[in-house]
Image (cartoon, rainbow, N blue to C red):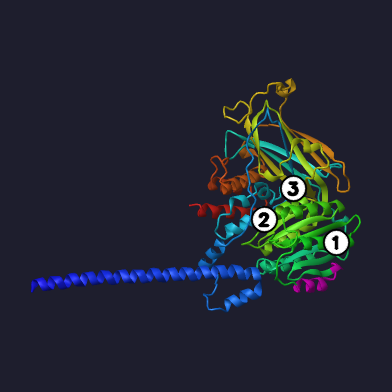
Amino acid sequence: MKASVSLFFRLLFVLLIILANLAACQKHKAIKEESKDKGMVKQEAVLAEKRGPRAMDELKSTSLPPMGMTREAEERDADFSTEEYGRIYENEFKDAKQNPLSTFSIDVDNASYSNIRRFITGNQMPPKDAVRIEEMINYFTYDYPQPEGNYPFSINTEVSTCPWNKEHQLIHIGLQGKSLNYDDLKPCNLVFLVDSSGSMSSANKLPLLKQSLKLLVDVLDDRDKISIAAYAGSAGLVLSPTPASRKDRIINALERLHAGGSTAGGAGIELAYKVAEESLIRDGNNRVILCTDGDFNVGVSSTGDLVRMIEEKRKKDIYLTICGFGMGNYKDNRMEQISNAGNGNYFYIDNIHEAKKVFVKEMRANLFTIAKDVKIQVEFNPVKVKAYRLVGYENRVMANEDFNDDKKDAGELGAGHTVTALYEIIPAGSAEEVKKTDELKYQETRVKTAAAESEEIMTVKLRYKPPKEEKSKLIEHPVIDRDISLERASENFRFSAAVAGFGMLLRDSKFKGDMTYEAIIDLAKNSKGKDTEGYRAEFIRLIETCALLSK
């Protein structure tokens, strides 16, 4: 009897194990099927978005699970992101004896800052190559004095301790463009080229674009002309040149824009320049303003072809401004290259507040160029400097011989603009190792006696052309090291250093030294200044968010 009971319990135990295994298999199969369904949703969603709004509506009416804005949906979107950013190779330290000259073109774009803000406010760290430090620094204005005499800008320099490496120094270079004279404004001929392709259907793309342009219309007057061209869904000339005072007509044209179809970007740009040329205002401000997510895929779509086309058009004094919108398939590297070729500016509009900043508060100044092809060349005194590196501006570095070549294109400076650049310096006498080339066989480098006797740490040289001239003018500005401690440095210096330090942390730069989020927050808070518009306070909140995300 005892043996029969024992056998019964053994069989029962084996049966329970079999049932448990069967249940596990069924659960695994269900998970696999669910994963397969989710994969189908992802694929269908991506294909439908490319086909346009109608396809998206059809997708929502199918029996597949609904696409709500859940955490799962956000992860799905991130998985299928096709955003593109150009690879950034950080500037290295250069030996001041072997490489005494550093040359670069100015950059007043600030798209990178608002783009990385979009990631951070979404509780996500931005891609490293989305972080262009010079654009972060130049998102903010600085308190530089107005230029004197006939010069279109003032040059301001400062030397102090480097916040992320106390053994190094940081040199701050700031340009201040002459403010706009609102009593003597030149009329504007603005051609808006609107991307109305299927990829622009999201709320943060074409709908936000329409609201942004309405803000600009409100600040123009009857001497200004507006045209609207579109490609893809609303292809062709949507609004012929119209006085800005006809706001009702302009807004009605904007409202007719709808998203759909593929993106024939090259043909759209050709049309926009044709309209701008036909309605050209002599001695006025003529500009094409391209609003897009950068996803060109039909027609003249390669970046190289578009750049060459735009380089030809700028010779007719028709400049280009690019305003980027959206996420998911954003093509940052393409738009930055195109704007550089078109003597223009590049902005990223991530919300309606940024639209107000760009189109209402800054657009007038952005449209009026006071100096073109602005280049900076710095010569370092090797008696004072062992090595240096330019912080940011990686895609603006120029060959030293290009500084004196007036045929070489460089950046433009708008009325009232500020431009800021930083150099990190290893002082002469430092024991720190620096990369060098072999000694030359046929010649030798000799430092002049006067260099040893001079208090100058470097000389800043600038070349620029007045807007209607093709021969450049030269300005020279010697810089003295006055040994100012970081605590006594100006708010301009300390705040720009905080922005640069933040950018290096986001890039996980090998040059970030001992910089921490807490140190940047402290540096930024103590140099916030007046901050009338609240941009610097917002910057501090972004650092605080990243500090939490990094834990």
Looking at the image, residue 100 lies above or below residue 398: above
Q: Residue 488 vs residue 466: left or right? A: left
For mark 2, does the 10 Å Cα neighbourhood hold few (<14), some (14 to 19), or many (20 or more) residues?
many
Q: Mark 2 points at which residue?
A: 332
| Quarter of the figure with residue 474 | top right
Location of residue 58 by image quarter:
bottom right
User: Marks 1 and 3: which is nearer the front?
Assistant: 1
Q: Position of residue 547 (x, y in %)?
A: 52, 52
Relative depth, front residue between 481 and 60: 60
Contact, mark 2 vs mark 1 (Cβ under 8 Å): no
Residue 309 among those drawn in magenta: no
Q: x%, y% of residue 447?
A: 71, 22
Secondary structure under tag 1 reads: helix
Q: Is residue 202 visible?
A: no
Q: Give the range drawn in magenta.
A: 240-256
* Residue 232: % across, % down: 74, 68
Which residue carries the number 3 mark?
A: 418
SS class, disc 2: helix
Q: Name the residue under label 1.
A: 274
Can residue 212 be seen in the rendering of this structure?
Answer: yes
- 3D distance between C-alphas at marks 1 and 3: 32 Å
Badge 3: how crowded within 10 Å, few (<14), some, or many (20+)?
A: many
Q: Name the amino acid type tagged 2.
A: Asp
Q: Which amino acid, mark 3?
A: Thr
Depth check: give the residue in front, 234 or 121.
234
